[in-house]
Image (tube, rainbow, N blue to C red):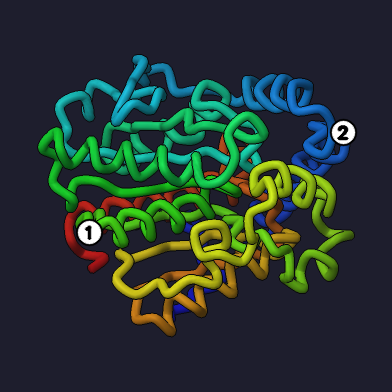
Amino acid sequence: MEELGYRAARRIGDQEESQVSVQELEVVRGLLRETEIGLAGPVGAARENFDAMLSNIPVDDDVAFEPAEVGGVPGQWSSTPATASSERVLLYLHGGCFNIGSTTGYRALWSAFAKGAGARGLALDYRLAPEHAFPAAVDDAVAAYRALLDAGHAPRSVAFAGDSAGGGLVFSALLGARDAGLPMPAGALALSPMTDLTLSGESLETKADADLSLSYDDLAIPAGRYLDGADPAQPLASPVFADLTGLPPVTIHVGSAERLLDDSTRIAAKLGADGVRVNLEVWPGMPHVWHSFAFMLSEGAAATARACAFLEDCYEGRAA
């Protein structure tokens, strides 16, 4: 396993620029302190609050969106004039602890990764709990990938990406595809992934004061709704416990100020032990999925650029 730690795409060279970055991060932390999603509360209200928060993130003017249905799973395509005819597809799985989130709410984030990687984006509105319990989300992701292959997309032209619960779902979908005999895609990107629904990582407690995004209940209660009595330790629910042999190259980004830090470090170690090429980047002081704040946070823009560079390497075969 190659642990790169923190290496920004845009180096902050002098004290003045470094201070600006600190000030930007403090603004972000202030927003997180003031934002109440209510993940542990009523699902309907949490969904509205979450999408309302995400709607404030600007979308690039040149990105076009259109409805999609791939393998029976609804979602959205994104493209720019430069990527409209591209064979590359970025299959994106949004976060929200399997209870909330939508492709519309997340469109700024997933379309930015697709654009930066020179790909068309395909984000899925996979089925959410509690209406649809585990393994509905996994089944949807695998069905969409199978449909892309059946439509003639070469595996090397498809990459997976996701954040938070969607980042964990990336691994579950890859396992489901592998076990179904499907060829692996070009690579996978996981941002602050939730990979352990047993909630056994030590950072859930050790990073409690640092993490302004998620409380323990914000993770435990939605995870319980998603599992609906299923064993949280089974591989498709908690891929940190899976045999990950045969998965494609993976890059994982996580902030050091996250409760889910151990979900990233542990699955990275397991990937390496199982012979998968993995690049783990732990970014000091960064909050959960800080890439969402790329429009106002230098480290968000830098991490997004690094993620897009990795995805380009996957499509070009350089990450294999």
Please report whichever mark, 2 or 1, sits nearer to the chain's N-terminal start.
2
Residue 35 seen? no
Residue 132 in which image quadrant: top right
Residue 111's label in the rendered image is none
Tell me the residue that label 1 is attached to. 181
Crowding around mark 2 (Cα neighbors within 10 Å: few <14, some 14 to 19, many 20+) is few
| Image coords of residue 94 (percent x, y) | 52, 38
SS assignment at label 1: loop
Image depth: mark 2 or mark 1 in front = 1
Q: Which residue is more in the foreground, 193 or 169?
A: 169
SS assignment at label 2: helix
What number of labels is visible? 2
Residue 119 seen? yes
Q: Which residue is more in the foreground, 145 or 309?
A: 145
| Image coords of residue 280 (percent x, y) | 50, 69
Indicate the quadrant containing the N terminus: top left, top right, bottom left or bottom right.
Answer: bottom left
Q: In this view, does 238 lie above or below 102?
A: below
Disc 1 marks a residue whose amino acid type is Gly
Q: Which residue lies at the image location 69% right of the left edge and 51% below the top edge?
A: 229
Q: Is residue 276 above or below residue 178?
A: below
Indicate the quadrant containing the C terminus: top left, top right, bottom left or bottom right.
Answer: bottom left
- Whether residue 91 sits left or right of residue 81 in the image: it is right
| Image coords of residue 48 (percent x, y) | 72, 19
| Extreme residue in the left direction | 152
| Extreme residue in the front direction | 229
| Image coords of residue 197 (percent x, y) | 66, 59
Crowding around mark 1 (Cα neighbors within 10 Å: few <14, some 14 to 19, many 20+) is few
Q: Is residue 10 above or below residue 240?
A: above
Disc 2 marks a residue whose amino acid type is Glu
Tell me the residue that label 2 is attached to. 34
Residue 83 in which image quadrant: top left
